[in-house]
Each structure stands twice: as structure tokens, then as C-alpha cells.
Image (cartoon, rainbow, N blue to C red):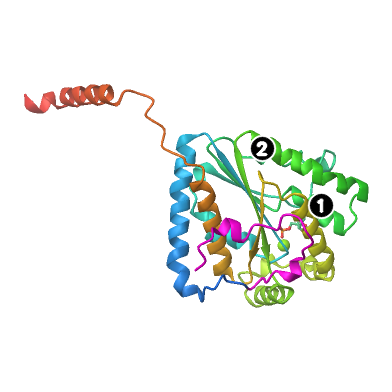
Amino acid sequence: MSQRPFSDRFCAPHGGQWHLRDIDPAETDGLHGKKKVRKEIKQYAQRMRELQYLLYAEGKHSLLIVLQAMDAGGKDGTIRHVLGYMNPQGCHVAPFKVPTDEEKAHDFLWRVHPHAPGRGRVSIFNRSHYEDVLVVRVHDLVPEAQWRRRYDRINDFERLLADNGTTILKFFLHISPQEQLRRFRKRLENPAKQWKISEADYSERRYWDQYQAAYEDAIARCNTKHAPWFIIPADHKWFRNLAVSRIVVETLEGLNMALPPPSVDIDEIRCKYLAELDQAREPDRQ
Ligand code: AMP
Ligand code: MG
């Protein structure tokens, strides 16, 4: 296995010309098969849970995880299988759908900011403010000059969150069009998944290239040090889960968090508690 941190391996390119089509969505970093890495994924997920406990207890940092992907790219699966290990008490999942009339009447970040994590907390965005330079761009929902200005606004917004102690990780779950079609077919065949199918899923496939171009621009323009983008090969769900959990663990480890010292004098509490316990025992002794 590669010794380089996953966070470096899958960080989106900084500068230069690059295309998503040149990044293999089926890559597995030399690892073979789900069975062998199942244990490893579980270990990372458990470590992630311990680190989230520290984050919560320490109350200094917060973590924002942004998940973006083409339809059937695995956002829901990543939340269920990886991020679902987090303690729900300190974790908030925010899905972003077609904006309501009220949301449309405001600036595009108005609906997003309230979901940013407070200190000690984790927020997971299932889609995000990036939709406003993705679907909005592909379907000309606002004039080009308007969505073009949004890259700067997004960088400013993410800078604001980072300055306030939020660590930001943005994952693009990268699948091939063939894998998307396989997943759509499975949804059609599996009654438990049929509710997920929408006509739009199929019609949006026609815009595959436009979406990929929009993703390339969004990733390139908003791949900052304080809010990096990761391009996760996601045709293999097990590899996607491993990569996301490893990057989250590596990042949280890097915060060097520690349990805070107790806010009270433990010896004093213990003495008091023991004295009370002894008192409570008195009747038994008589
Ligand atoms: P899903 O995530 O499958 O439930 O679908 C949510 C839908 O909402 C997707 O088709 C997104 O493209 C769409 N959506 C999310 N944010 C926006 C936005 N800002 N403008 C237009 N459509 C959006
Ligand atoms: Mg969908």
C-alpha cells in the first residue's frame, strides 16, 4: 500500500490543465477486493468516531464535510457507511435540494450558512453551495456573469468558516458514466431502491460532459489550502469508503486534539462524593 497520506494522493491538482476524464474512477491504489480491506475500513471508521469524540469534548474546532457527485455517485452511501459512524449528537447532515421560493429570494449562501458547524461539531453537506455553480451553470438557471462571480464568493465564505476554526474537506465522488448506468439499473431492479429513481436522473445523463466541465472549474477555482477538494475514485464503493474515512482520520489527527482538563477539582469532588456516599451508607450500618 502507498505510504503517502491519502490526503495528498487524492487532493485535486493545484494549477495546470487537467481533466476528470484522465482520472480513473475505478482506481484502488493497488488494493484488491472489498473483503481484504473491510477490516481496515472499520478501523478507520472507529478511529473517526474517537476523534469526533475528542472534537466534541475539546470544543475548539469544527469540521465541515462537503459531498458532491453525479447522480448515483454515492453521497448517500458514504454518509451511511462511513460518516454514519459519527455520534449523531455532535453531527449534522444537511441535504441541499432545489431551492424553495424563499431561498431563491435570497443570495445563494443564505440557506447554507446556518448549517455550518459550531465549535465541537461536524456538519456533512449532501450537495452544497457548489450546486450553484454546477446544476445552475449547466441549465443556465442564472446569467453566466452571476454564476461566474460565485467562485469568489464561495472562496470568501469558506475562508470565513476556516478563520472561525472550521476544517473543511470537500469530496468529489468520481464515477464513470458506465458505473452510473449500472447503479441506475440496480435501482430499477431493486424494489427497495426504486423510490430513489427520478426521470431527471436519466435526462441529466445527456449533460454528462457539461457537468464534468462544471465540476472541473468548480474544483480548480475553489481548491484552496483552507478548503481543499479531493477527487475520490468512486466506482468501487469499498475504495471510496476507505479513502474518505482515511482522509477524515488523517485530517482530524492533524488537529492534535486532546481531552480538555476537568473544569472542576476532581479530588475535591471525589472527597465530597465519597463523604456523601458514606452518609448514604449510614442507615445500613446502624
Ligand atoms: P437529490 O440529491 O437526488 O435528492 O436531488 C436534489 C436535486 O436538487 C438535484 O437534482 C440537484 O441538482 C438539485 N439542486 C440542489 N441545489 C440546487 C440549486 N441550488 N439549484 C438548483 N437545483 C439544485
Ligand atoms: Mg438524485
The correct choice, above or below, for 225 with respect to 118 in the image is below
Ligand 1 within 8 angstroms of badge 1 C-beta: no
Indicate yes or no whether the magenta region holds residue 115: no
Q: Main secondary structure of the magenta part?
A: loop
Quarter of the rendering occupied by the C terminus? top left
Tell me which corner region of the image, top left, top right, bottom left or bottom right, holds residue 268: top left
Q: Nearer the viewer, residue 283 or 5?
A: 5
Q: Which mark is first along the chain, 1 or 2?
A: 1
Left or right of residue 5, residue 142 in this image: right
As drawn, the label of residue 93 is: none
Q: Secondary structure at mark 2?
A: helix
Tag 1: amino acid: Val
Q: CA distance from mark 2 to mark 1?
A: 19 Å
For the point 86% across and 55% down, which residue is it?
A: 137
Can residue 179 be seen from the camera position used here? yes
What residue would you read off at disc 1?
133
| Boundaries of the magenta span | 1-26
Instruction: Give percent across and percent down for residue 139.
Output: 88, 58
Can residue 98 be seen from the camera position used here? no
Tell me which corner region of the image, top left, top right, bottom left or bottom right, holds residue 20: bottom right
What residue would you read off at disc 2?
161
